[in-house]
Image (cartoon, grey):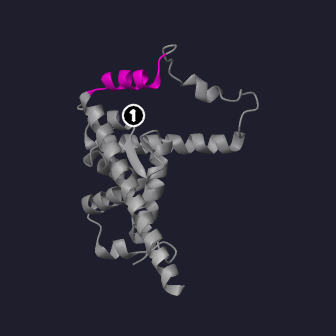
């Protein structure tokens, strides 16, 4: 089967958002891929297509592009541990009770097209020389009470969260903690294996 039999990445934008939503608002790359494959009904032959002879599958490769574009569109965000989560904008899009899935899919496509236009403009103009260093970061920074410690600030933020937002945060933290624990176990196992090999060769 050829790569042309796998949907292009822009057709996986909405399915990716649906998958993260179904998984509670945050998910690992593997969870997203598994859910998209199941929801879209990809055949075994489609799943077997490799990108440039592997090891990554073409579906996995195009889902990676879909996640990256959704991040650029401010609908998804990710952590260093490979956990992807809905942003406030993404949550608003998928939970709007007045919207239909057809409208949401169309809206995602509109946002993608707008993002492409902005990206092309940015490449042509390059970084502005007039912009002050750090201006972009400071313009969106929230004002914090003077003298407030980090614990008080954190507690204030948590107390102000909606119940559904707090639940999504808890799920994301749990996934990241599980991912970190799994990586630690793998490193420990590798260290033991390496030590045993060294002892045996001594």
User: Is residue 92 something that shows in the picture?
Assistant: yes
The magenta segment is 148-162
Q: State the residue at coordinates (62%, 45%).
A: 120
| Quadrant hosting residue 107 | top left
Is the C terminus in the top left, top right, bottom left or bottom right quadrant? bottom right
Residue 150 drawn in magenta: yes
Q: Which residue is mark 1?
A: 89
Is 119 left or right of 87, judged from the image as shown? right
Q: Secondary structure at mark 1?
A: helix
Q: Residue 166 placed where, x, y %?
A: 29, 32
Q: Residue 183 placed where, x, y %?
A: 41, 60
Residue found farthest to the bottom: 201
Residue found farthest to the right: 129
Is the N terminus in the top left, top right, bottom left or bottom right quadrant? bottom left
| Quadrant hosting residue 130 | top right
Residue 8 drawn in magenta: no
Q: Residue 9 placed where, x, y %?
A: 44, 57
Q: State the residue at coordinates (33%, 37%).
A: 169
Is 74 left or right of 17, judged from the image as shown? right
The answer to which of 127 and 186 lies nearer the viewer is 186
Image vertical order of residue 45 relative to residue 95, above or below: below
Image vertical order of residue 189 relative to residue 88, above or below: below
């Amino acid at each position: 089967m050829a790569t042309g039999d796998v949907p292009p990445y822009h057709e996986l934008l909405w399915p990716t958002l649906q998958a993260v939503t179904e998984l509670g608002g945050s998910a690992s790359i593997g969870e997203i891929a598994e859910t998209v494959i199941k929801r879209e009904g990809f055949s075994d032959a489609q799943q077997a297509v490799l990108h440039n002879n592997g090891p990554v599958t073409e579906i996995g490769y195009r889902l990676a592009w879909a996640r990256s574009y959704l991040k650029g569109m401010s609908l998804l965000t990710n952590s260093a541990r490979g956990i992807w989560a809905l942003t406030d904008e993404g949550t608003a899009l998928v939970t709007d009770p007045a919207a239909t899935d057809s409208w949401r899919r169309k809206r995602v496509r509109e946002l993608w097209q707008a993002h492409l236009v902005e990206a092309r403009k940015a490449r042509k103009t390059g970084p502005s020389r007039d912009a002050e260093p750090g201006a972009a970061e400071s313009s969106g920074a929230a004002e914090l009470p003077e003298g407030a410690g980090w614990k008080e600030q954190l507690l204030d933020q948590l107390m102000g969260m909606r119940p559904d937002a707090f639940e999504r945060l808890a799920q994301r933290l749990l996934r990241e903690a599980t991912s970190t624990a799994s990586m630690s176990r793998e490193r420990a196992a590798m260290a033991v294996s390496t030590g045993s090999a060294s002892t045996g060769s001594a």
